[in-house]
Image: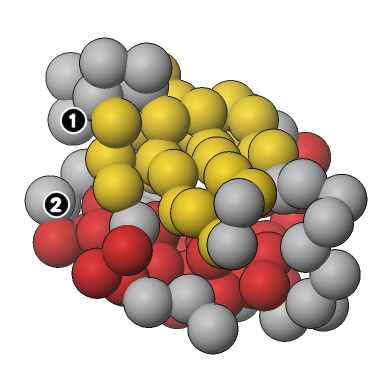
Amino acid sequence: MVDAAELIDNDFLRQFELKIDDHLAKIEYSLQERKIFLTKLIIPDEIKDEDFKKEFLAAVFEQINERNLSIVPTSPEIAKFVRSNRKYKRMLPVGVRI
């Protein structure tokens, strides 16, 4: 359902965006040095697909990984996703545990 080609990094608003039908899912972030702080996950209530959140987060994490940035999840939902997916834990900066 999530196509990485449709994922937009809106650096003006500092958020990753993915438009599904007429709804916009987004992850707000703050970029400092080589770290990206993922601060807020917003998925519209109209998107009912259970796997959408996982697929959306995975697509965002892959894009961040390609840019060789470390992630600091400050949103509880995003931190939970990192905890449940070991392959993304390696993207955490040294000394950061969740």
Residues tagged 1 and 2 counted as in contact (Cβ below 8 A): yes
Viewer-proximal residue among 28 and 79: 28
Residue 65 in the image: x percent, y percent? 23, 60
Q: Is residue 8 left or right of residue 42?
A: left
Q: Is residue 94 left or right of residue 55?
A: left
2 lies above or below 77? below
Image disc number at residue 34: 1
73 lies above or below 43? above
- Amino acid type of the residue that numbered disc 2 sits on in the rendered structure: Asn
Crowd around label 2: few <14 · some 14–19 · many ≥20 (10 Å): few
The local secondary structure at tag 2 comes to loop
Q: Earlier in the sequence, mark 1 or mark 2?
A: 1
Residue 47 in the image: x percent, y percent? 77, 63
Viewer-proximal residue among 77 and 4: 4
- Amino acid type of the residue that numbered disc 1 sits on in the rendered structure: Arg
The image quadrant of residue 86 is bottom right
Q: Where does the N terminus fall, quadrant-wise?
A: bottom right
Viewer-proximal residue among 29 and 82: 29
Which color scheme does this rendered protein use? secondary structure
Q: Is residue 3 left or right of residue 78?
A: left
Q: Is residue 86 visible?
A: no
Distance from disc 1 to disc 2, alpha carbons, whole Å, reads 8 Å
The local secondary structure at tag 1 comes to loop
Q: Is residue 88 visible?
A: yes
Image disc number at residue 68: 2
